[in-house]
Amino acid sequence: MSFAYLDSLWFSLYRNPSSKDKVLSWINKERIFTKAYVFVPIVCWGHWNLLIFCHFGENLRSVTESRCMLLLDSLEMANPRRLEPEIRRFVRDIYKAGDRPETKHLISQIPLLVPKVPQQKDGTECGNFVLYFIKLFLELAPDKFSMEGYPYFMKKDWFTFEELDRFCESLTH
């Protein structure tokens, strides 16, 4: 499965007008439109989320592969939808920087899905959740993500806290 991972600082840097163009040039070098999935860790307001671009290089009218965005948030009470305007602007600028033919209207039609995923117990676990989301997504994601199968495995019972704890322990050993 083809995927790319964007640096966790890039979304934050993109939000700063003085570094926006630089970030877009870095992203352009990643050739994200050739990847099935692109992981974009987002750190805003002291909280980590995981944005996943699915099949961004595919035709918007494809019936076998659905171009969409997934926003995985382990702290739903932080209201992940508040990021949507900035995410949409980010995506429009990525398409523009990549000299893609999609119009602003077509790009605005790309769904931003926020599946109900396991929630953290405290205010400090969000980074661990993002890493674990990436690991499990890589293991379980279908080759061809389709809206028909959504939310696939991304549900409140996707994994247990014991599994997350074992994963976190493995990172330190």
Image (cartoon, helix red, strand yellow):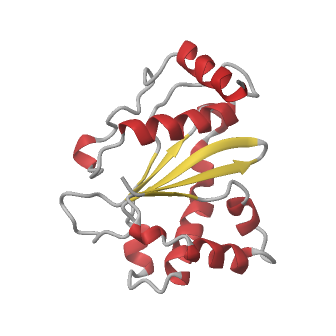
The residue located at (67%, 20%) in the rendering is 169
Residue farthest to the left, as pictured: 63
The residue located at (62%, 40%) in the rendering is 79
Question: Residue 154 location in percent, x, y?
Answer: 41, 33
| Quarter location, residue 27 | bottom right
Q: Is residue 144 left or right of residue 136?
A: left
Q: Is residue 169 left or right of residue 66?
A: right
Question: Residue 43 location in percent, x, y?
Answer: 71, 49
The residue located at (70%, 24%) in the rendering is 173
| Quarter location, residue 55 | bottom left
Residue farthest to the right, as pictured: 18
Residues 10 and 60: in front is 10
Question: Residue 122 location in percent, x, y?
Answer: 72, 21
Question: Residue 141 location in percent, x, y?
Answer: 36, 42
> Height in image: 62 above or below 143?
below
Q: Is residue 63 left or right of residue 75?
A: left
Residue farthest to the front, as pictured: 173
Q: Is residue 126 left or right of residue 108?
A: right
Instruction: Tally the marks.
Output: 0
> Height in image: 164 above or below 93?
above
